[in-house]
Amino acid sequence: MSNHNNHFEIRKSKRLKQVHSTRDFFTGETVLFICCEELKTPTQHTIQLDVNYHVLDPIVKYIKHSFDPNVRVEGHSLVAIRKIREGDEIKRNYYETEEIIVKEFTDKETGEKVNTKNLYLFNNKNTDDGLLFNAEF
């Protein structure tokens, strides 16, 4: 199976590169198979697929974070969670896969800081254990 067919283009916008679809994808359709270099530790450009299992993929490394993503990780695939139209930017929520955020940044859509502390709060927002978050990162 080919990982990267001709369904994407990388566009340069100011200083950033973005991944855009060159065709429509339907909800539930596999958008991309994630492969390539495997690493034990995360970097700014890897995607975490399991505990201590990070992958540096030449397309996925340019997929930006969004709190309103159009794909999610399922195993080694990115799957559309809503219809993606030709030309749409591909976006995923880093909080859904990563255990730590290597480099803090500000989400351009919401202005919210994306960092390991907020990742912890995001993943534990629905717990009723009364735990107070007081760790330093």
Image: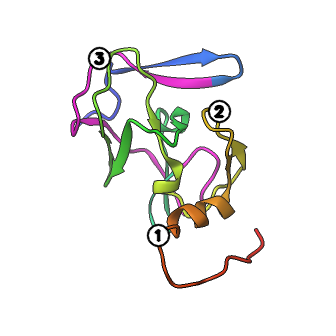
Q: Which labelled disc corresponds to residue 68?
A: none
Would you place residue 25 above or below residue 77 in this image? Answer: above
Say which amino acid is labelled 3.
Answer: Arg
Please count the marks in the image: 3
Choose the circle earlier in sequence order: 3 or 1. Answer: 3
Quarter holding residue 16: top right
Image location of residue 134, percent across then percent down: 74, 77
In the image, 78 versus 28, the foreground residue is 28
Residue where numbered disc 1 is placed:
126
Image location of residue 58, percent across then percent down: 49, 34
Residue where numbered disc 3 is placed:
23
Say which amino acid is labelled 2.
Answer: Lys
Asked whether residue 41 is in view, the answer is no
Say which amino acid is labelled 1.
Answer: Asn
Residue at screen point 60% across, 33% down: 109
Decide whether residue 23 is among the magenta residues.
yes
Specify the quadrant that holds the C terminus.
bottom right
The magenta region covers: 17-46
Residue at screen point 59% across, 60% down: 119
Q: Is residue 110 left or right of residue 52?
A: right
Q: Secondary structure at mark 2?
A: loop
Q: Which labelled disc corresponds to residue 108?
A: 2
Q: Residues within 10 Å of mark 2 (few under 14, many from 20)?
A: few
Q: Residues within 10 Å of mark 3 (few under 14, many from 20)?
A: few
Q: Secondary structure at mark 3?
A: loop
Name the mark nearer the viewer: 3 or 1: 1
In the image, 90 versus 11, the foreground residue is 90
Asked if disc 1 and disc 2 are in contact, CB closer than 8 Å, the reply is: no
